[in-house]
């Protein structure tokens, strides 16, 4: 029996970034690639203020507010 593929987890943090646990590949508009191995984590900016976009640099701590919740959908 084959092992199940690793699960990618995306956590929405209240008033903060998305925490993404890999494996995942981030590709920027110019084709730059950032590979995240299984089990490692990165945080992605939601506030738009980061100087290291798409990654979070904690700029959201200057006043960003969002407490988004995942909507339940039927498949």
Image (cartoon, helix red, strand yellow):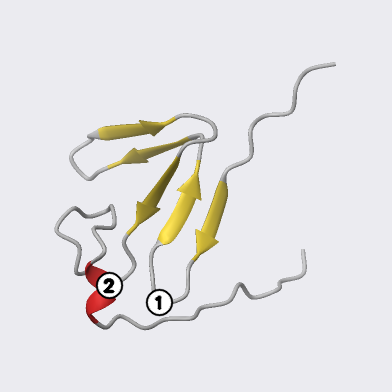
Question: In the rendered image, which quarter is residue 2 located in?
Answer: top right
- Residue visible at 28% across and 52% down in the picture: 55
Q: Position of residue 75 (x, y in %)?
A: 77, 63
* Figure quadrant of residue 66: bottom left
Residue 46, above or below 36: below
Q: Is residue 28 left or right of residue 41?
A: left
The secondary structure type at the circle numbered 2 is: helix
Q: Are marks 2 and 1 in contact (CB under 8 Å)?
A: yes
In the rendered image, the vertical position of residue 33 relative to residue 49, given as above or below:
above
- Residue 60 occupies which quadrant of the picture? bottom left
Q: Position of residue 51 (x, y in %)?
A: 14, 58
Quarter of the figure that contains the N terminus: top right
* Residue under pointer 2: 60
The disc at residue 50 is: none
Q: Position of residue 38 (x, y in %)?
A: 53, 31
Residue wearing tag 1? 15
Q: Residue at x 26, y 83 (%)?
A: 63
Q: Are there few (<14), some (14-19), or many (20+) residues within 10 Å of tag 2?
A: some
Residue furthest to the left in view is 51
Residue 5 in the image: above or below residue 45 = above
Residue 6: where, in percent of width, then height? Answer: 63, 33
2 or 1: tag closer to the N-terminus: 1
Q: Residue at x 61, y 72 (%)?
A: 70
């Amino acid at each position: 029996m084959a092992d199940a593929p690793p699960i990618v987890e995306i956590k929405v943090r209240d008033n903060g970034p998305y925490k993404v646990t890999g494996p995942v590949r981030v590709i920027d508009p110019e084709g730059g690639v950032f590979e995240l191995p299984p089990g490692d984590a990165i945080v992605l900016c939601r506030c738009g203020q980061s100087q290291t976009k798409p990654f979070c640099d904690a700029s959201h701590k200057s006043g960003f507010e969002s407490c988004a919740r995942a909507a339940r959908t039927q498949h």
